[in-house]
Image (cartoon, rainbow, N blue to C red):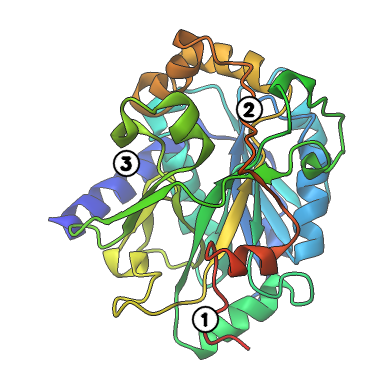
Amino acid sequence: MLRLQRKRWKVRAFRKRRELVEVKNRTKGIRPDDILLFCTFRNEDVRLPYFFEYYRKMGVDHFVMVNNGSTDGGDDYAAAQPDVSLWSTDAGYGNARFGMDWLTYLQWRYGHGHWALTVDVDEFFVYPFCDTRPLAALGDWLDASDVRSFGALMLDLYPQGPVSEARYERGMDPLEIASWFDAGNYTISQNKRMRNLWIQGGPRARAFFSDKPEQAPALNKVPFVKWNRRYTYVSSTHMILPRGLNLVYDQQGGEKTSGALLHAKFINTFSERAQEEAARGEHYGAGHEYQQYAETGQDDPDLWTKWSEQYLNWRQLEVLGLLSKGNWA
């Protein structure tokens, strides 16, 4: 049944390619060993400069981007970057499996055989030794270990004080104004059908879903994959098919090398974005998460507590048990 579902999603993505308009295609310059990044964005002009800077330093060679109806000029900025290939669409984000149909087609077309990172513009990937070893080194080690996918915990970051006071300026590292996170408060269960871990908790769970924690956003991700045309993400990057790719954890109770996605969502732009997305209803569950922010009047929250930890580096996350270097020495 899962094999049939995967085929259906591949067919669906191939049909959805008609919604994409090529803006700037530089994929002919992609080399066989290049690290690729796939991303869908909308009205992220203020974030894009640092996003590109961060991932270039990490070792991304080419960005394959989809602009979904931006009106702030971010699409023009992205198209002007020499290492970016850009497509554009005004079609519904929700009707494209929250952008996954568009990215699945582009991954099928350009990602085969490459280590591919799939992230949002407000997500920043960290992994063991990321301060000294580029993504290519991680990919080489995973290849040598015969591993095709790499898991990460999405770690929500927030400022000390109201979100509206974390004033973000274009090109700024968001961790300069929002660097705190929850070290605990996480629950883990296993999805036996898809074989992935389902992780919930952190500041969103305690601040917005305390009375219904089962509805809190999922924090498990599989963002880094040695792509093959047979693959497709199921729900954002939370799950992937074939389901063996979701086994990014040690099934015997030990530790397997893993990373984290620093999620810089809670800055001063959060309130406006929450209200907009609640009205659009294009995100998962008809924008349920954003509606929850708006309905509870917490679109300008103060998430900091005396138990909050300030982010330092990946080694801190390893000590706290939020990522692991496993046997990568």
Q: Is residue 65 left or right of residue 279?
A: right
Which quadrant is home to the C terminus?
bottom right
Q: Residue at x 69, y 61 (%)?
A: 28
* Amino acid on which disc 1 is placed: Gly
> What SS does tag 2 mark?
loop
The residue that label 2 is drawn on is 42
Please report whichever mark, 3 or 1, sits nearer to the chain's N-terminal start. 3
Q: CA distance from mark 1 to mark 2?
A: 36 Å
For numbered disc 1, what is the local secondary structure? loop
Residue under numbered circle 3: 12
Identify the mark nearer the N-term, 1 or 2. Answer: 2
Tell me the residue at 12%/55% (across/down).
Answer: 1
Horizontal side of 16 relative to 155 (left or right) equals left
- On screen, residue 125 versus residue 109, left or right, reads right
- Report x, y in % for residue 247: 34, 69
- Considering every residue shown, the one lying at the far front of the view is 306
Nearest the viewer among 159 and 258 is 159
